[in-house]
């Protein structure tokens, strides 16, 4: 049993008196202890005997509470754009498992605190520290994250992701499996991993492979950021509401007592509006995207971009790709192509295999160093250009270090 001291999970029971809290039931499979919140009513009752006065409670990085028939999951690490730590992944998993069979929870809503992001991804500084130290917690992080991703995709109750603000990398992994994906005018969505020498994981090889045409290859290889209109047009979002409407819906849901998932979902769908398409790029360049990113190799993509009549966009895209890790854009292209013919469970197992290689033989450590540690933005990739990347180097990423029966994600199924 390990005690996780820097996070808490608590649940606000709809039948409790105002200000009282109900601790979530403990799940031994998570091997962690969950502390209950001491609320204001309890503190007032204790004031006559408490000495010295208790210090203010540190806010947890994940707040999980049941209120009005809704399980609320709030990522509460705004100073890091709600980037995921291992403790946050465990807290989310604990809450979702607890609510899955709770008759008082009709739906789950995921949101991010701070107004800037739902979730900007994983804690890449932790990745760097763990990888350079040979810390086994690195693979533990990805193993538990991918289990959480699979749980969300297969969740038995409606799971609504409020994709307001930055939603990148790991943030996509905890939102793309939602039954309702809500975007706003502030949404900035991307799978930008090739920029730091990684690949689009958290199921990215699976859900990008299911985007229309060859837009998935484009988004995965380039790491291009898109906004609400593009996300809706290619099926990476379901519903657009303005931030003003979202604030009103949030308050309405928090104040109500909801008896069904349909009522909860309708609060969003009935407030849906058309997004501003002024910054949409995919529809404008769709023909070029499909033509270029249908090529069988990254070299072929570069060649088609060079010959494109969509001159300015093609040149910008090629320049963008040239800054990425040559090895990892080749690996990413292969990942998405393979993802078209696999199940989600097999995809997540594959991605865990690949993560063991990306820090050992790939560009992950160097990419994170350049972006987030030394911040010189001048990564020294293992290959000077895509022409230096060999096919056998790409193929090596798809070899599992585990025997089938020993795979950490063996238990996942579709």
Image (spheres, rainbow, N blue to C red):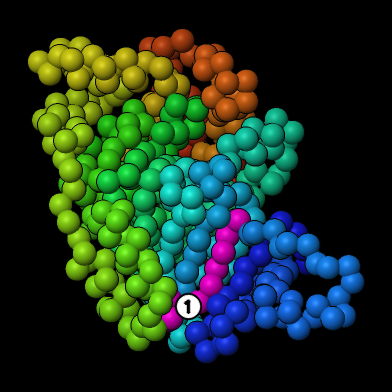
Front residue (pair 210, 297): 210
Q: Secondary structure at mark 1?
A: strand
Q: Is residue 92 magenta?
A: no
The stretch in magenta equals: 61-70
Left or right of residue 331: residue 313: left
- Where's residue 275, x and y in %? 18, 48
Front residue (pair 227, 323): 227
Left or right of residue 288: residue 378: right
Residue extending furthest toward the front: 48
Q: Is residue 76 visible?
A: yes
- Where's residue 365, x and y in %? 60, 27
Residue at 42% across, 73% down? 254
Residue at 70% across, 30% down? 132
17 shown above or below 336: below
156 shown above or below 290: below
For the stretch drawn in magenta, what is the main secondary structure?
strand
Q: Is residue 408 visible?
A: no
**The image quarter in which residue 48 lies:** bottom right
Q: Is residue 68 magenta?
A: yes
**Which residue lies under the disc numbered 1?**
67
Left or right of residue 25: residue 354: left
Q: Quadrant of the C terminus?
A: bottom left
- Where's residue 307, x and y in %? 15, 12
Residue extending furthest toward the right: 51
Front residue (pair 219, 110): 110
- Where's residue 173, x and y in %? 43, 51
**The image quarter in which residue 356 lies:** top right
Front residue (pair 362, 120): 120
Residue at 48% across, 24% down? 393
């Amino acid at each position: 049993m390990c005690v996780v001291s820097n996070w808490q999970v608590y649940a606000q029971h709809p039948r409790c008196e105002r200000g009282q809290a109900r601790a979530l039931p403990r799940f031994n499979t998570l091997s962690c202890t969950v502390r209950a919140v001491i609320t204001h009513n309890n503190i007032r009752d204790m004031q006559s005997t408490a000495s010295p006065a208790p210090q203010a409670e540190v806010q947890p990085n994940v707040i999980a509470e049941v209120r009005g028939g809704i399980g609320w999951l709030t990522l509460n690490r705004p100073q890091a754009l709600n980037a995921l730590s291992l403790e946050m992944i465990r807290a989310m998993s604990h809450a979702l498992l607890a609510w899955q069979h709770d008759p008082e929870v009709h739906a789950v809503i995921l949101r991010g605190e701070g107004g800037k992001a739902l979730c900007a991804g994983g804690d890449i500084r932790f990745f760097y520290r763990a990888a350079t130290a040979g810390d086994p917690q690195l693979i533990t992080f990805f193993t538990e994250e991918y289990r959480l991703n699979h749980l969300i995709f297969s969740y038995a109750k409606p799971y609504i992701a409020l994709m307001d603000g930055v939603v990148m990398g790991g943030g996509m992994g905890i939102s793309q499996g939602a039954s309702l994906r809500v975007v706003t005018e502030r949404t900035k969505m991307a799978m930008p991993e090739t920029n730091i020498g990684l690949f689009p994981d958290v199921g990215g090889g699976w859900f990008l492979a299911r985007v229309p045409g060859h837009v998935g290859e484009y988004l995965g290889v380039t790491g291009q950021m898109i906004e609400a209109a593009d996300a809706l047009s290619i099926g990476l979002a379901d519903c657009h509401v303005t931030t003003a409407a979202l604030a009103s819906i949030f308050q309405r849901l928090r104040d109500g007592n909801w008896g069904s998932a349909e009522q909860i979902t309708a609060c969003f769908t009935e407030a849906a509006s058309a997004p501003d398409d002024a910054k949409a790029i995919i529809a404008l360049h769709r023909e070029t995207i499909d033509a270029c990113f249908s090529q069988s190799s990254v070299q072929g993509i570069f060649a088609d971009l060079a010959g494109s009549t969509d001159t300015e966009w093609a040149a910008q895209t090629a320049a963008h790709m040239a800054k990425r890790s040559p090895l990892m854009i080749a690996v990413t292209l292969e990942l998405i192509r393979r993802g078209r013919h696999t199940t989600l469970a097999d995809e997540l197992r594959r991605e865990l295999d690949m993560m063991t290689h990306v820090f050992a033989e790939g560009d992950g450590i160097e990419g994170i160093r350049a972006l987030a540690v030394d911040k010189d933005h001048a990564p020294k990739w293992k290959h000077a250009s895509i022409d230096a990347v060999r096919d056998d180097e790409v193929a090596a990423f798809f070899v599992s270090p585990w025997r089938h029966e020993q795979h950490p994600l063996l238990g996942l199924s579709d």
